[in-house]
Image (cartoon, rainbow, N blue to C red):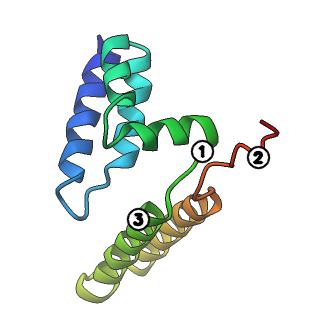
Amino acid sequence: MAFLCLGLVALGLGLLGAFLPLLPTTPFLIVAAWCFARSSQKLHDWLYDHPRFGDLLRNWEAHRVIPAWAKICSVSAMTASFAYMAFFRDMPAWLLAVTGAVLLGVAAYILSKPSNPPSAEREGC
């Protein structure tokens, strides 16, 4: 029951992220798919067969792919958020440094993932 509730919350946040510019969609959908895999096969299948989000989730699960457009959006949003905190907020230097380090780590992880799934030729099929 907890996984189902968490999955529904993550799905709701992911759907909001599809329309709100600074709220990410893909990470919430990945969490929702993970939760649904443990609680509701029907919702899991619906999410993986969704015409807009299904390919993203299947490519992430199979190949850990993050599309180039998603990388650009996420790193741009992180950069804009950090710039806002650095220039328009009175934050202690230590907190700004910790935030910057975390954002750099997340950006490095995102950028380290492939942008496209491997082609069938390179897999030997």
Q: Residue at x 27, y 43 (%)?
A: 14
Q: What percent of the width, then of the height, locates residue 18?
A: 23, 52
Mark 1 or 3, closer to the camera: 1
Q: Is residue 91 above or below residue 30?
A: below
Q: Is residue 98 above or below residue 13?
A: below
- Left or right, 30 with reference to 13: right
- In primary-sequence order, the first of circles 3 and 2 is 3
* Number of the label disc, if any, that sits on residue 64: 1
- The quarter holding residue 31 reads top left
Residue contact between numbered discs 3 and 2, judged by CB atoms under 8 Å: no
The span from disc 1 to disc 2 (Cα, nearest Å) is 18 Å
Under circle 1, the secondary element is loop
Residue position marked by numbered label 2 in the rendering: 121
Q: What percent of the width, then of the height, locates residue 73?
A: 38, 68
Residue position marked by numbered label 3 in the rendering: 74
Residue in front for this viewpoint, 59 or 109: 59
Q: Is residue 48 above or below residue 82?
A: above
- The quarter holding residue 91 reads bottom left
* Number of the label disc, if any, that sits on residue 99: none
Type of amino acid under label 2: Glu
Under circle 2, the secondary element is loop
Q: Residue at x 48, y 66 (%)?
A: 103
- The quarter holding residue 53 reads top left
Q: Badge 1: few (under 14), some or many (20 or more) residues near its Cα, within 10 Å?
A: some
The span from disc 1 to disc 3 (Cα, nearest Å) is 16 Å
Q: What percent of the width, then of the height, locates residue 92?
A: 36, 78
Type of amino acid under label 1: Arg
- Left or right, 50 with reference to 115: left
Q: Badge 3: few (under 14), some or many (20 or more) residues near its Cα, within 10 Å?
A: many
Residue contact between numbered discs 1 and 3, judged by CB atoms under 8 Å: no
- Left or right, 114 with reference to 16: right
Q: Residue at x 40, y 65 (%)?
A: 74
